[in-house]
Image: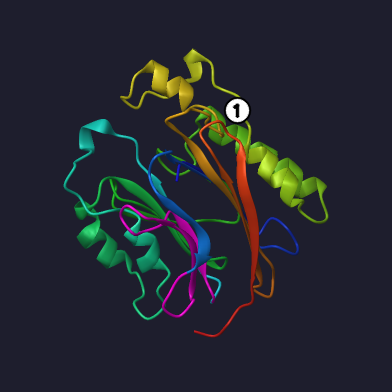
Amino acid sequence: MCILFIALNQHPEYPLIVCANRDEFHHRPTEPAHFWQPGNELLAGKDLEAGGSWLGINRQGDFSALTNLRDPMKQKSNMRSRGELIVKALKRHEPLTMSWLREHSENYNPFNLVFGHANELYCFNSVTQEPTLLTSGFHSISNGALDDIWPKMARGSLALEKLITESAEPDIDELISIMKDETRASDMELPQTGIGVEWERLLSSIFIRHEEYGTRSTSIILQDQQGKTRFVEVRYDGKGRNLGRQMFTVEPTQA
């Protein structure tokens, strides 16, 4: 997952609105969003190389998403897959705790993990070892710290805020359009994350189009006051072409 925008308690009907893009190498095998076996409790896409995910929900209305923290000097090849954290965060019979994250986060390459539900949503930064309770408002999470002012993070947050405040009912297609913005930052605005200016340029847009690495999917989540969730996923190929779209509706159940 490369970037997600969250509107928390900013719409009268939908306390949780999430727009997210997953950026990944196009050759990495992936299964589209589906209910996982056994039990059909977890709804998420699946990374078929390591077995985890990047974003998902469960039938109790819990949400989780993951972004990598971009720091080449801290990347190691023998670490556990960060995608398994999504699965752990959404298993109700094994609740994810802050103490567990602090104890085990060193087994993974650096990450931001968002998890919880609309009434109590956290972002855990594995480098600082600190959880942040998300306040009501608009939040952006990418490959740096929560609510960093990277150009694409600011652009997406403003677009989401404008759409929500001007619409009685959020339009799915307009939310997807926000996530397909290919505007790149100027060189003066680029963050310095240690990957070189060419990659900084490529990764400075919300939607990344490149034949080897780019935006693989967009996910939209709308959760209403009763806990009913709409989950929309659109998938793309290396040229940014639509590979398919699906929508799920999940009714809340008791844990």
Residue range (magenta): 36-59
Residue 198 in which image quadrant: top left
Closer to the camera in the image, 28 or 195: 28
Closer to the camera in the image, 120 or 185: 185
Is residue 200 one of those drawn in magenta? no
Residue 218 x, y percent position in the rendering: 58, 46
Residue located 33% across and 24% down the image: 195
Residue located 20% across and 50% down the image: 79
Q: Is residue 202 above or below residue 7?
A: above
Residue 228 in which image quadrant: bottom right
Residue 82 x, y percent position in the rendering: 31, 53
Location of mark 1 (residue) = 182
Left or right of residue 116, residue 163 in this image: right
Residue 10 x, y percent position in the rendering: 69, 55
Type of amino acid under label 1:
Glu
Residue located 40% across and 74% down the image: 91
Q: Residues within 10 Å of mark 1 (few under 14, many from 20)?
A: some
Q: Secondary structure at mark 1?
A: loop
Total numbered labels: 1
Residue 227 x, y percent position in the rendering: 64, 73
- From where the camera sits, is residue 64 visible? no
Is residue 39 one of those drawn in magenta? yes
- From where the camera sits, is residue 206 visible? yes
Left or right of residue 137, residue 209 in this image: left
| Residue found farthest to the left | 78
Left or right of residue 101, residue 152 in this image: right
Coloring scheme used: rainbow
Q: Is residue 70 above or below residue 167?
A: above
Closer to the camera in the image, 119 or 44: 44
